[in-house]
Amino acid sequence: MKTFSLTGKLAIVTGASRGIGEAIARKMAQSGARVILVARSQERLKTVAESIRQAGGQAWPVVADISREDQVIKMVEKITRDFHRIDILINNAGIGYALPVPETTASDWDLMMNTNARGAFFCSREVFKVMVEQKISGTIINIASLAGKKGYRYQAAYCASKFALIGFSKVLAMEGRDYGIRVHLICPGGVNTEFIRKIRPDIPPETLIQPEDIAETVLFLLHQSPSVVTDEILMRRFTSEVI
Ligand SMILES: NC(=O)c1ccc[n+]([C@@H]2O[C@H](COP(=O)([O-])OP(=O)(O)OC[C@H]3O[C@@H](n4cnc5c(N)ncnc54)[C@H](OP(=O)(O)O)[C@@H]3O)[C@@H](O)[C@H]2O)c1
């Protein structure tokens, strides 16, 4: 069996200060990648980066709000200047909370759309340009959700943002193919993080997917044979309804 390594690869993981993004960053660093950790909270990012380094990995924190176009442009410019290449982008940063439609305000709608859909678009566009310029056959993995495949009560803005992300990813995958850039979607159900405790407090914690399960799936996608591409992976809690 081939041993899998990400040694030499430069990976950006957004939303890496906790939860799924942190687990993905740790797993990628264990596989040898140099990992850029992106989020808004500097202190949490620093703590994650230090702990990855203590475990023998390579990680650097970069503070950016992905919903701000100017900050994303600056972030990608800085990473390209400092590291000279970008091989992998994991669009994981996201926000969601539950509200009935009549109580959903314009700012709730904008916050979820601007982070989950627009933010992932900004990061993808800027990284895509670098990959094309550098002729890098890179990989972009978008962490969407099962809420991007079906409706969930009280999650109108969140579902809309994840449906939008999935639509965007489909087109990115088509355009990426022209340059050897692979685009994958992972659509998880409930994962054991701070996020799910806010949006779905009704789910018994012992039935949740673990963040490490998503990280393993990212590694699976990254080491698939070059002759195949898995466009999307739907991961549901075993005790939940079949999609
Ligand atoms: N947990 C689940 O059940 C579940 C299921 C399906 C899909 N997902 C998706 O998986 C992703 C990660 O979720 P999670 O459960 O790990 O959530 P989480 O624990 O709340 O973590 C979210 C991460 O995103 C970052 N973030 C949020 N807004 C940001 C912004 N504007 N700019 C930069 N970073 C931002 C947060 O850091 P800062 O606050 O420091 O910026 C944090 O690192 C999200 O896209 C979520 O929609 C989660």
Image (tube, helix red, strand yellow):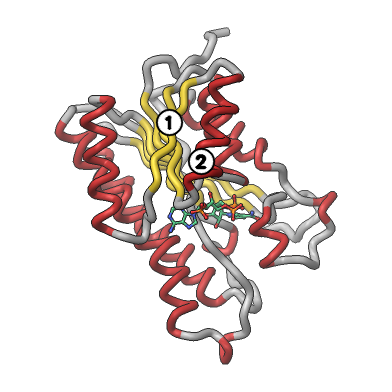
Q: In the figure, 57 relative to 197: above or below?
A: above
Quadrant of ligand 1: it is bottom right
Q: How many residues crowd mark 1 within 10 Å: few (<14), some (14–19), many (20+)? A: some
Mark 1 CB lies closer than 8 A to ligand 1? no
Report, in whole angstroms, how far the alpha carbon at label 2 lies from the one at label 1.
Answer: 8 Å
Q: How many residues crowd mark 2 within 10 Å: few (<14), some (14–19), many (20+)? A: many
Front in this rendered view, residue 22 or 209: 22
Name which residue type carries label 2.
Leu
Q: Position of residue 109 (x, y in %)?
A: 46, 77
Quickly name the residue at label 1. 60
Q: Position of residue 143 (x, y in %)?
A: 50, 49
Q: Secondary structure at mark 1?
A: strand
Say which mark, if any, is on residue 45. 2
Q: Residue at x 52, y 27 (%)?
A: 28
Q: Quadrant of residue 83?
A: top left
Q: Earlier in the sequence, mark 2 or mark 1?
A: 2
Q: Position of residue 182 (x, y in %)?
A: 35, 36
Quick one: quadrant of the C terminus? bottom right
Q: Secondary structure at mark 2?
A: helix
